[in-house]
Amino acid sequence: MTLELYITWNPDPEIFRIGSIAVRWYGVLFALGFVFGYIILQRMFRREGVPIKVLDSLTTYMIIGTLIGARLGHCLFYEPEYYLSHPLKIFAIWEGGLASHGAAIGIICTLIIFSIVKKRPFLWVIDRIVIIVALAGFLIRMGNLMNSEIFGHVTELPWGFMFVNANNPLEATAARHPTQIYEGLSYLLIFFYLIWYYYRKEGKPEPGFLFGMFLILIFGIRILIEFVKEPQVGFEATMALNMGQLLSIPFVIAGIILVVRAKKGGEVAK
């Protein structure tokens, strides 16, 4: 008789409910990304003598860019036929469906606008933002874990998770790779590396270096983990590389270019 070892994962995705309003772990963890990010950036800005009102404005841009980018990314990259046929459903964020690649594009676009409006160098802004984005990525993946979603292939490894609350009952019949934990812990380590480098350089890293390393590490890890992750949409099952991997490649290439330029330039950030 073979002894099967795995972890039964059966959390309630809701923390509590008041009438028809439910407070979910995913929403709380998503919001905590902004809370912790604000606290960390506040200390960094004070260290560099930047007015806090700049951070308040930056936070507003970040929230807008993240939500719009993540939602549109999911709708257009993963299920374009459905959402183009039902455009009003794009606004139904509470039904789920946010894409990290879309969030990355949305953040970059809004930070470009922010840098123009507030007359702050784009690389100066984004080098600091990516530090807290890495931390937010960890929290979001923990939210995915509480939702029992975005998990991996079937595994016989002893740390495999049996996701009892999986949306598809057929997916709850075998232990699977907890890819949310793989990704989340990777993002947390990246956060520690980026903030360590920032303070090692006394708050003056080479312009573009942190942004470049963020792109290389975050999306490089994403490419690797996607090999053991279940397809998020049906058409991915027939692809050699899934949509997440294909979308990650340009970000990794951009990161390499940024790091090389930053190290060659050697310019000290103001």
Image (tube, grey):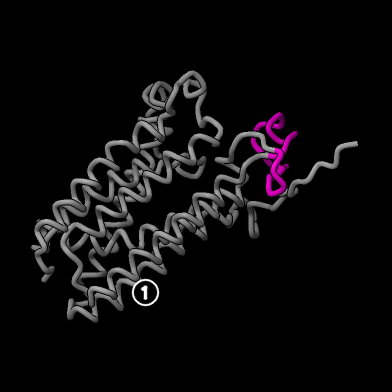
Horizontally, is 45 left or right of 176 in the view? left
x then y, percent, for residue 9: 71, 49
For the N terminus, give its image quadrant: top right
x then y, percent, for residue 63: 33, 56
The prevailing secondary structure element of the residues shown in magenta is loop
- The residue nearer to you, when weighing 209 against 134, is 209
> Which residue lies under the disc numbered 1?
39
Residue 170 magenta-drawn? yes
Horizontally, is 178 left or right of 88 in the view? right
Q: Which residue shows up at 36% across the image and 31% down it?
A: 246
Q: Which residues are magenta?
A: 156-175
| Residue at the extreme right of the image, as rendered | 1
- The residue nearer to you, when weighing 220 against 25, is 220
Q: Which residue shows up at 36% across the image and 48% down it?
A: 67
Q: Quadrant of residue 71?
A: top left
For the C terminus, give its image quadrant: bottom left
x then y, percent, for residue 130: 30, 58
Residue type pointed to by label 1: Ile
x then y, percent, for residue 233: 50, 27
Q: Quadrant of residue 119?
A: bottom left
